[in-house]
Image (cartoon, rainbow, N blue to C red):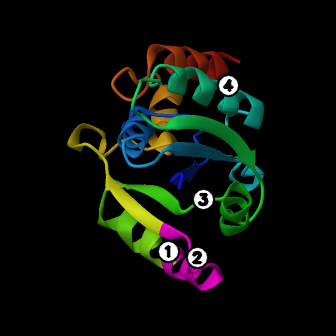
């Protein structure tokens, strides 16, 4: 039976922390769906099309024999409904700090009430990426700070281009 995992997020923008979690998740499932949330309420810097394109470009570098196949899909609905439509058996979430755990613990409890057949697994971010958050990367870039340690060169260019406008 194929093990299908789902790693959901806004990915506005995709960071080295996200890529670390994706790389780890690829070792655990046969097929990994990266669910890019539309999240208009969060007023993302990048459009859904731009975020999907960035994710596709970044994930193309991770393709290797023996690792999960990656699919990147947008979604704008309840996470559990999206997971059910995709035939997911596990939702993969990244944790950076205790504050992440409190939020994720609550979300997992609610999701379990909606569908007890879909598990949630938490992956700890590498220590180098534990402080990285898309929100902070955007703020550093907006005020002229160096974001090279937090995103790939391609993503960095896209962020800096946004703030030039």
Q: Judge depth for marks 1 and 3 and give the one in front.
A: 3
Q: Is the C terminus in the top left, top right, bottom left or bottom right quadrant?
A: top right
Front position in the image: 164 or 91: 91
Which residue lies most toward the left here? 127
Task: State the separation of the CA atoms marked 3 and 4.
Answer: 23 Å
Question: Which residue is at 38% across, 21% downward?
Answer: 146
Question: Which residue is at 38% across, 49% downward?
Answer: 28
Q: Write down the region rendered in magenta.
A: 107-119
Q: Is residue 111 above or below residue 40?
A: below
Residue position for label 2: 111
Number of residues whose C-alpha sits closer than 10 Å to that of mark 2, classed few (under 14), some (14–19) or many (20 or more): some
Percent of width and height locating residue 94: 40, 53
Asked whether, in this view, residue 27 is left or right of residue 103, the answer is left
First along the sequence among labels 3 and 2: 3
Percent of width and height locating residue 114: 65, 81
Residue position for label 3: 88
Which residue lies most toward the front here? 1
Residue position for label 4: 53
Residue 108 — which label?
1
Percent of width and height locating residue 110: 57, 81
Front position in the image: 146 or 94: 94
First along the sequence among labels 1 and 4: 4
Q: Do the residues under discs 2 and 1 have CB atoms within 8 angstroms? A: yes
């Amino acid at each position: 039976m194929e093990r299908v995992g789902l790693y959901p997020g806004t990915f506005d923008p995709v960071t080295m922390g996200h890529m670390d979690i994706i790389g780890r998740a690829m070792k655990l499932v046969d097929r990994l769906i990266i669910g890019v949330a539309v999240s208009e309420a969060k007023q993302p810097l990048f459009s859904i099309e731009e975020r999907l394109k960035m994710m596709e470009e970044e994930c193309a570098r991770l393709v290797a024999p023996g690792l999960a196949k990656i699919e990147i899909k947008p979604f704008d609905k309840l996470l559990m409904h999206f997971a059910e439509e995709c035939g997911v058996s596990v939702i993969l979430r990244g944790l950076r700090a205790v504050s992440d755990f409190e939020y994720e613990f609550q979300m997992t409890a609610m999701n379990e009430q909606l569908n007890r057949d879909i598990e949630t697994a938490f992956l700890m971010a590498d220590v180098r990426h534990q402080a990285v958050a898309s929100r902070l990367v955007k703020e550093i870039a907006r005020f002229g700070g160096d974001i090279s340690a937090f995103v790939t060169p391609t993503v960095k260019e896209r962020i800096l281009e946004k703030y030039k406008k």
